[in-house]
Amino acid sequence: MIFNILYQVFKVLNLVIFVWAIMSWIPTLRESSFYKALDSLIDPILAPIRKVIPPIGGTFDISPMILLIGLQILLSLLR
């Protein structure tokens, strides 16, 4: 039961991170209130990853990709 709930939460988080990452590529969407709300949720999750792996060249941030891979591993363990 608890594993099913965690599985669903991680699936939703996976989708939210993906949407946030796509929106971050479009400058006009980054100014929207929806993006800012997602950013306030996602940024604290990405901060520890960014401390270990800073953006490449100061501009290319791979922390969302690392988080998505980690979530996929967790999802596969919860199945």
Image (spheres, rainbow, N blue to C red):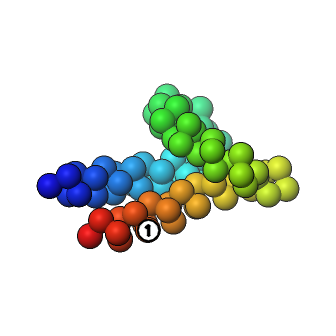
Q: Is residue 54 something that shows in the picture?
A: yes
Judged left or right of residue 41, residue 51 is: right
The residue sitting at 64% across, 50% down in the picture is 49
Q: As rendered, which of 7 and 64 lies closer to the eye?
A: 7
Rendered image quadrant of residue 39: top right
Rendered image quadrant of residue 74: bottom left
For disc 1, the neighbor class at 10 Å (few under 14, some 14 to 19, many from 20) is few
Instruction: Give the farthest residue toward the left.
Output: 1
Of the 4 image quadrants, the one containing the C terminus is bottom left
Question: What x and y, as percent, mark residue 65?
Answer: 58, 61
Tell me the element at label 1.
Answer: helix
The residue sitting at 54% across, 57% down in the picture is 67
Question: What x and y, as percent, mark residue 36?
Answer: 53, 31
Q: Which residue is mark 1?
A: 73
Judged left or right of residue 57, residue 51 is: left
Kind of residue at badge 1: Ile
The residue sitting at 20% across, 52% down in the picture is 2
Of the 4 image quadrants, the one containing the N terminus is bottom left
Count how many numbered circles sit on residues in the image: 1
Q: As rendered, which of 36 and 56 lies closer to the eye?
A: 56
Instruction: Give the farthest residue toward the right.
Output: 57
Q: Is residue 44 above or below residue 22?
A: above
Q: Is residue 27 above or below residue 55?
A: above
